[in-house]
Image: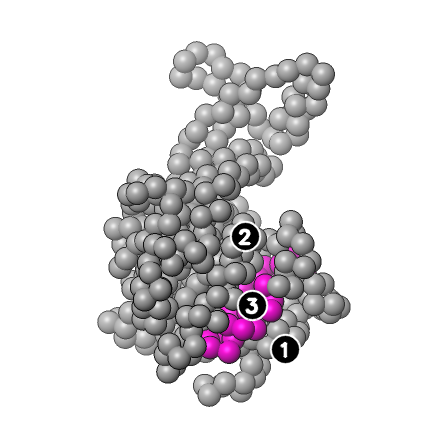
């Protein structure tokens, strides 16, 4: 578990941030409606059923249907906000940051699923109808069935069509940080990064905003695609401080794509700390960060604010989480929020972990005050 002294220091750092300080963050560009679903095993009447308990049970039923046919009843228990962008944006709203949420959030009007986000965000911009994910839930895991066609609307051309080039420049000019997440499912993201670097950011602003990017499990994308994304990030780095956020699997995939040996060390965050150093140095970006289930690490390059360095820290593991979907997005939100508040990277890791830790225990995006209390409780 997280070090008590570090928890106390992180809590104090967050308390010290003026309450009226509201950094502006633009977050885009995906959007999913997540349907949480039971697969019916046996139905006894119109309102009563038992659900399949395990993925193996469903697998057995499917296998038995080979050469025949089968009918499976799906019961939607809940429809909720989904997508890396909307979940991260929602978490930043809980910090009381000024958030502009951009994505496929509804065709015409914002879909009712995203209304809570729209009510809290400073501005919401929809690029089209939302994608959907049907999450079949079992005691031993989930099967996620994605319908991604609406994500085809997430392109540079759509952004220009929706906002105009002047509107797009204004969007990128006013934000203290810009998060562009879910690269894997956003086939147009590499072009967005490249065109922003070539056509929007040159001469746009005197400062260097923070640009946070998240790959979101690039295993299904080709090596050529991944390397093209790396090249685009280097182009963005000319105009901004790029922060690449990863989980453990993504860190290994990035290192492999870079042709770099994956470090092995104990504790787990030490291997990730070394891996983040390698990613930061090979890509030439400002930041590389990795969040794991039980810990996290990050590395940064030389800047006007601090000399190059790296750090790792244990986190807030919960063996019986109430929710796991969105845990990484909450870590990302807390970490970015802390950096924008000028908080030390070590404490930012703890704040990211506490934001995620609170969320997985409650299924609620925590406020700044709730994160402080969570840290204090873990400081003993």
Residue drawn at point x = 52 percent, y = 75 percent: 237
From this viewpoint, is residue 36 visible? yes
Q: Is residue 242 magenta?
A: yes
Residue 198, image x, y percentages: 48, 71
Residue 232 is labelled as 3
Give, as a single range, the part of the protein colored magenta: 229-252
> Mark 2 or 1 closer to N-term?
2
Tell me where residue 110 appears, x and y as whole percent: 30, 44
What mark, if any, has residue 197 been given in the picture? none
298 or 54: nearer the eye? 298
- Colouring mode (rainbow / by chain / secondary structure / one colour): one colour
The residue identified by callout 2 is 187
Q: Earlier in the sequence, mark 2 or mark 3?
A: 2
The answer to whether marks 2 and 1 mark residues whose Cβ atoms lie closer than 8 Å is no
Q: Is residue 353 magenta?
A: no
Q: Which residue is mark 1?
A: 281
Q: What SS does tag 3 mark?
A: helix
Instruction: Residue 295: tell me if it is visible.
Output: no
Residue at screen point 34% across, 41% down: 107
Total marks in image? 3
Q: Residues within 10 Å of mark 1 (few under 14, many from 20)?
A: some
Looking at the picture, how far across and down is residue 253, in whole percent?
A: 67, 59
Mark with earlier residue (1, 3): 3
Q: How far apart are labels 2 and 3 at the CA level?
A: 14 Å
SS category of the residue bearing label 1: helix
State the CA–CA distance, disc 2 to disc 1: 26 Å
Q: Quadrant of the N terminus?
A: bottom right
Q: Are marks 2 and 3 in contact (CB under 8 Å)?
A: no
Task: Give the class, few, some or many, for how many residues have Cα within 10 Å of label 3's Cα (few <14, many ≥20).
Answer: many
């Amino acid at each position: 578990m997280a070090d008590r002294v570090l928890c106390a220091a992180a809590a104090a750092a967050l308390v010290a941030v003026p309450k009226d300080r509201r950094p502006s963050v633009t977050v885009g560009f995906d959007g999913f409606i997540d349907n949480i679903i039971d697969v019916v095993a046996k139905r006894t009447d119109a309102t009563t059923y038992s659900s399949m308990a395990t993925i193996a049970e469903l697998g057995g039923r499917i296998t038995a249907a080979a050469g025949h046919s089968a009918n499976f009843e799906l019961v939607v228990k809940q429809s909720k906000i989904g997508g890396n962008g909307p979940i991260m944006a929602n978490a930043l709203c809980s910090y009381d940051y000024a958030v502009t949420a951009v994505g496929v959030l509804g065709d015409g009007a914002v879909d009712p699923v995203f209304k809570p986000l729209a009510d809290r965000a400073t501005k919401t911009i929809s690029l089209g109808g939302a994608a959907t994910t049907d999450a079949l839930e079992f005691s031993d895991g989930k099967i996620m069935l994605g319908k991604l066609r609406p994500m085809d609307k997430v392109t540079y051309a759509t952004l220009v069509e929706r906002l105009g080039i002047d509107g797009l420049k204004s969007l990128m000019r006013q934000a203290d940080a810009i998060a562009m997440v879910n690269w894997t499912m956003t086939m147009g993201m590499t072009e967005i990064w490249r065109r922003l670097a070539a056509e929007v950011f040159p001469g746009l602003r005197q400062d260097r905003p923070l640009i946070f990017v998240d790959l979101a499990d690039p295993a299904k994308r080709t090596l050529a695609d991944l390397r093209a994304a790396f090249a685009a990030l280097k182009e963005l780095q000319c105009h901004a401080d790029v922060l690449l956020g990863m989980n453990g699997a993504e860190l290994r995939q990035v290192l492999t794509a870079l042709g770099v040996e994956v470090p092995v060390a104990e504790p787990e965050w030490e291997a990730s700390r070394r891996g983040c150093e390698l990613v930061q140095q090979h890509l030439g970006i400002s930041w590389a960060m990795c969040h794991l289930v039980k810990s996290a690490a990050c590395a940064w390059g030389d800047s006007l604010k601090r000399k190059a360095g790296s750090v790792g820290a244990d986190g807030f593991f919960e063996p019986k989480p109430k929710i796991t979907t969105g845990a990484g997005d909450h870590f990302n939100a807390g970490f970015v929020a802390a950096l924008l508040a000028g908080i030390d990277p070590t404490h930012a890791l703890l704040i990211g972990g506490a934001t995620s830790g609170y969320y997985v225990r409650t299924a609620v995006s925590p406020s700044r005050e709730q994160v402080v209390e969570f840290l204090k409780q873990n400081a003993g």
